Every structure is written in C-alpha cells, then in structure tokens.
Image: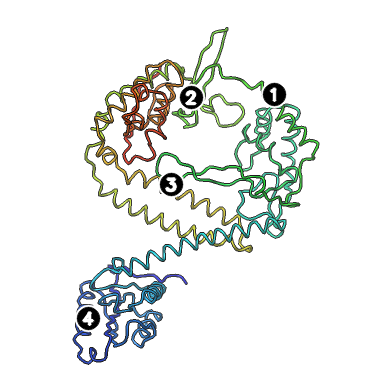
C-alpha cells in the first residue's frame, strides 16, 4: 500500500492524536499519571504547532495489542484523522517489541508518524532494534528476490526461451516477447552476412568497418562501425544459432576510490545453459568455420606489429580536445625514426569521428611530465598549503543532503524495478531501459557527492608532511632512471592522468600519504626499501585504503 503524503508543518497545522495509558484501574481513578502524560503531550503539540483533534486515555496492560483505546487510535489513523500520534514514551503504546513494530508499520501506511515527549523514537532501544530489523529484513528480501529472479531465468532458459534482462539485444534479430525467442530482422541480417563474407575476402576489420560506414549503414546503437565491433560480430556464436545463458558474470573488483566497480568474467562451462532453438542462424556453418580459421591462423597472429618503442604514457594520456585516448605512433620517413603520441581519432578514416589534434613528440612530452612530477614530489608541502586554505562548506552541506536524498529515491526506484523482473507479462526491454537510466543517474549523483563531500582542505588535513616528503623523495629518485619500466612505475605510484594538446598539458595525480610497507619494517635493509617492487601504489601505498589522498594538478604551457 503506498504511503500517504505527510503535510509539511510549515504549510498547514498538522492534526495530532494524544494517546495516554496506565496499567491499572487504580491509576486511572487517581488520574495523576494520565493527567501528567496528557499535559506533557499537550505542551509538545503546542510547541510544534500541531492541532490536537482527539485524546485517548485508557487503563490496560501494555503487553496486549488488542485493547479498546489502541483499537480506537488505529481506526482513527486508518480513516485519516491525523498525521501525528503523540505519546509520553514508547512503552505507553506497548511493552512488546513485536507490537511496536506492528504499530510502527501501521502508522507509516496511514501516513502518520510517532512523536514521544521523553525521547526520539529512533533513539530508543526499541526504535533502534525495529529500524535495524527492518533494514535487515529488507536486505534479506532483496536477496530472496534476486535468488528467485535468477532461478526463474534459469528455468526459462531450460524451457527454450531467452531470459529477460540478458542484454540490450543482438544485431540482426528482434526479440519476440510472446515466444521468448529471437526472430531474424531481414535488413540487419543481410548486413551480418556481408560482414562475414567481406572479412573472408579482405581479412581486414578496418576494411569492413570502412565499407559499412561509407555505405551509410548504422551499427546496432545507431552510430558508426568500428574495427573492434566487426571483430566481436565475427566471434559471436549467435549467428550460427547457438544461444548460451550464464556464459559470463559480473564480479566486484578492488579499485582506488569509493565507487564500487565490477568486471565481466567467464563462467566455467559446466555453468553454461544452452537454449536450443532460441535463435535462428544467419550464417551457415561453412562460412563460420572459414572465418574462424582466418581469425585463429597462427601465421596471421604472428604478423601483428610489434611496438618499436615502449610508450610510457600509454593508458594515462587523453586528448585535450576530444578527451579520447591517445596512442603511441612511430613514423620512419627516409629511414629516420620519429616517435609521437596522437589522438586515436586524429586523421581517422575508419569512422566519421575525426579529431583535429596534432601529433605530439613523445620524448618531449614524457620529459615535460617527468620534470613537472619531480617538482611536486620534491616539494609536496607547497601543494598541501594550497589545499589547506579554508573553504566555505555551508552550501556543500545542503548539496550533500540533496544528493543523498536523490540517491535514496533512486534506490527505492531500483528495488521496484527489480521486483518487476519476476513477472513474465512485464516487457523486459522497458524495465532494462529504466534500470540503465537509474544506474546512469546514480553514477552521476555518486560522483558529484564524492566530490562535494570531500573538499580539498579536508583531503590535506592531518597529513604528516615529514613522512609525505620522505615517501615522495623515494619515488622521485626513480625518475632519474633511464629504463621505461621505472618511469611507468612512478606514473603508477602517483596515479598519473594527463590531458594533452600540442599547446598545453594538464597533469593530475595523487600524492601518496603512506610509505611502502617494506620501508617501514626494521628488518628491511636500505636496498630493499629502494627496490622497484615498492612502487606499486595499490599494494604498497594503498591509495584505495588511506583516508587522505592529495590531488595534484598542474597545467604546463606548450610543447613546441
């Protein structure tokens, strides 16, 4: 039953019912205890601006739920007479935790809340127990819903129907909710056949994707075709009519930062469930086998280009114009070798997404970053002093409350959507789309909350500058090495991220706040503390565990 709206007390006077109880008739005849309770409740209602619409007094045992006065109160709330129940203490309603739980749920369903004169309900032992128990029950219920949903999907797969919520769909097919099976989409199926046939002739992912883009044929999501998309299409067994459920699963991974991350891993084959007849084939076995033979040809694999240079910034460098990844490239005009970093979309011919960023000389960029990181590592207290400047966080507190409220609303919305998966009559594609939107909103809100909740001055508070300087000096010493592996370890130790154009370079990273574990050990000799193994940030500097991490950000002008 949906919870009724509780009016804002600033908008209109809330209606209240005062409930008083004593245990014996003698106490009721004496009247002292009941009068005292009621007077205190009246004072609380007047102080809060509530309008008392009914007063209920009774003499009955607190261990019984069915009693005249309490029945009157529950009936009044069901009829919508009040938004607040006022009692002197929680034991006036009942001395049974079970009964309090029942009443608390009834009050919520009626759109009313419980207010006590002597204490806040949430601060009472009974209140804490009930709220904790409800949270536990909700968690158990979520687990039961997830387990029932997965069991239902497995049975659906074994019956020859594709389970709902197993993906956004598959290019070349449409999903028939009535039969639970895929049906061939003629136009897309023709494109799939073209991909297999053209690859068997050209043996080039780039050539096939370029042909599709030149012909104006959109990919599954409506965008351009990429070589990697073509490769995945060629490896998809669905196109020969094989549908497998529970092939992969998501597992949590440990990563820096507070956000929860997962990755997809393969399940053991004994957990796979093949769904016979769920997907009609588009490609015949002969063409499929021919393409797989080409893909798995050892001679073809051995001809893959071997990098002529180790690009130390790979995986850490983004284009300053389009924010895409930058890759290393070696050019050898007239036999002389030149090394560069370039945006992966610069001068691209395989897609319509082109970037105007120029090539950046690799050695100059790496040296520029090396020098800038060395400056910070040799004087980390300068960054700390900047971050320790006071800031006004009053607006941030309001923002945090707003974001937490919006995240809680999203969680409830997600729980309602999860429950819908158990019903076959619900369109799974609609629910999946809603869940994706909830996930997207949660990621945006969580990222914003993480930024607002931890201002820069709080990050720097409590850092031991002497210890920080010692750790940074140990890492900085490695910058003097000539080996690319050492340079890469330093970049990893400070969690370096770089955005670059030919005119400007922006560097972001983390100053480690704890020394390597081995350097803290008295048994570790000096050469051990200075070893390459101590430059791993996740295992030694523990960027993901320490409660303080200092952001460094530098913008450098021009790589001419």
**Quarter of image, res 222:** top right
Query: Where is mark 4, residue-wise?
Result: 37
Q: How crowded is mark 3: few (under 14 residues within 10 Å), some or many (20 or more)?
A: few
For the question of whether residue 373 can be seen, the reply is no
Q: Is mark 4 on a helix, strand or loop?
A: helix
- Numbered mark located on residue 300 in the image: 1
What is the CA distance from the residue labelled 2 to the residue labelled 1?
32 Å
Q: Is mark 1 on a helix, strand or loop?
A: helix
Q: Is residue 59 above or below residue 297?
A: below
- Numbered mark located on residue 444 in the image: 3
Report x, y in % for residue 279: 73, 49
**Quarter of image, res 537:** top left
Q: Residues within 10 Å of mark 2 (few under 14, many from 20)?
A: some
Q: In this view, does 413 lie to the left or right of 194?
A: left
Query: Where is mark 2, residue-wise?
Result: 357
> Which of pointers 3 and 4 lies earlier in the amino acid sequence?
4
Report x, y in % for residue 205: 67, 29
Viewer-nearest of discs 2 and 1:
1
What is the CA distance from the residue labelled 2 to the residue labelled 4?
77 Å
Q: In this view, does 481 lie above or below 198?
A: above
Quadrant of the snapshot with the C terminus: top left
> Which of pointers 4 and 1 lies earlier in the amino acid sequence?
4
Q: What element carries label 3?
A: helix
What is the image's colouring? Answer: rainbow
What is the CA distance from the residue labelled 3 to the residue labelled 4?
49 Å
Badges 3 and 4: C-beta atoms under 8 Å apart?
no
> Which of pointers 2 and 4 lies earlier in the amino acid sequence?
4
């Amino acid at each position: 039953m949906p919870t009724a709206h509780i009016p804002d007390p600033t908008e209109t006077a809330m209606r209240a019912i005062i409930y008083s109880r004593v245990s014996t008739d003698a106490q009721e005849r004496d009247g002292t205890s009941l009068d005292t309770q009621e007077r205190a409740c009246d004072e609380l209602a007047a102080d809060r601006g509530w309008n008392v619409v009914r007063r209920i007094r009774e003499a009955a045992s607190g261990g019984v739920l069915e009693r005249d006065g309490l029945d009157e109160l529950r009936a009044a709330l069901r009829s919508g007479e009040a938004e607040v129940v006022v009692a002197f203490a929680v034991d006036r309603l009942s001395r049974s935790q079970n009964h309090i739980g029942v009443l608390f749920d009834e009050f919520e369903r009626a759109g009313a809340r419980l207010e006590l004169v002597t204490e806040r309900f949430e601060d009472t032992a009974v209140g804490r127990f009930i709220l904790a128990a409800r949270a536990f029950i909700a968690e158990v219920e979520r687990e039961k819903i997830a387990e029932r949903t997965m069991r239902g999907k497995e049975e659906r797969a074994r019956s020859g129907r594709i389970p709902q919520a197993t993906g956004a769909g598959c290019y070349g097919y449409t999903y028939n909710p009535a039969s639970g099976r895929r049906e061939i989409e003629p136009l897309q199926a023709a494109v799939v056949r073209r991909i297999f046939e053209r690859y068997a002739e050209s043996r080039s992912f780039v050539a096939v994707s370029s042909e599709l883009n030149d012909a104006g044929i959109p990919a599954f999501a409506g965008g351009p075709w990429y070589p990697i998309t073509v490769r995945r299409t060629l490896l998809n067994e669905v196109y020969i009519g094989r549908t497998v459920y529970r092939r992969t699963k998501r597992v949590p991974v440990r990563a820096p930062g507070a956000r929860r991350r997962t990755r997809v891993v393969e399940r053991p084959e004994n957990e796979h469930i093949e769904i016979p007849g769920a997907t009609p084939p588009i490609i015949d076995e002969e063409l499929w086998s021919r393409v797989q033979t080409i893909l798995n040809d050892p001679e073809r694999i051995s001809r893959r280009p071997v990098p002529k240079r180790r690009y130390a910034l790979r995986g850490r460098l983004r284009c300053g114009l389009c924010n895409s990844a930058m890759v290393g490239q070696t050019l050898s005009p007239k036999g002389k070798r030149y090394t560069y970093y370039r945006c992966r979309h610069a001068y691209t011919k395989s897609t319509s997404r082109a970037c105007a960023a120029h090539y950046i000389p690799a050695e100059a960029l790496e040296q520029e970053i090396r020098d800038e990181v060395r400056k910070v590592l040799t004087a980390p207290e300068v960054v700390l002093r900047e971050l320790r400047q006071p800031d006004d966080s009053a607006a941030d507190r309001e923002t945090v409350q707003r974001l937490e409220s919006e995240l809680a609303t999203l969680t409830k919305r997600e729980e309602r959507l999860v429950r819908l998966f158990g019903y076959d009559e619900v369109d799974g594609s609609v629910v999946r789309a809603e869940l994706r939107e909830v996930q997207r909103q949660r990621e945006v809100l969580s990222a914003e909350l993480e930024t607002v909740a931890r201002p820069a001055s709080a990050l720097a508070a409590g850092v031991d500058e002497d210890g920080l300087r010692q750790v940074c000096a140990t890492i900085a010493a490695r910058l003097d090495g000539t080996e690319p592996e050492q340079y890469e370890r330093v970049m990893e130790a400070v969690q370096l991220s770089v955005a670059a154009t030919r005119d400007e370079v922006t560097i972001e990273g983390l100053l480690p706040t704890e020394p390597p574990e081995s350097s803290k050990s008295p048994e570790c000799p000096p050469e051990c503390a200075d070893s390459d193994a101590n430059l791993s940030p996740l295992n030694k500097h523990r960027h993901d565990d320490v409660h303080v991490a200092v952001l460094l950000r530098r913008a450098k002008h021009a790589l001419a």
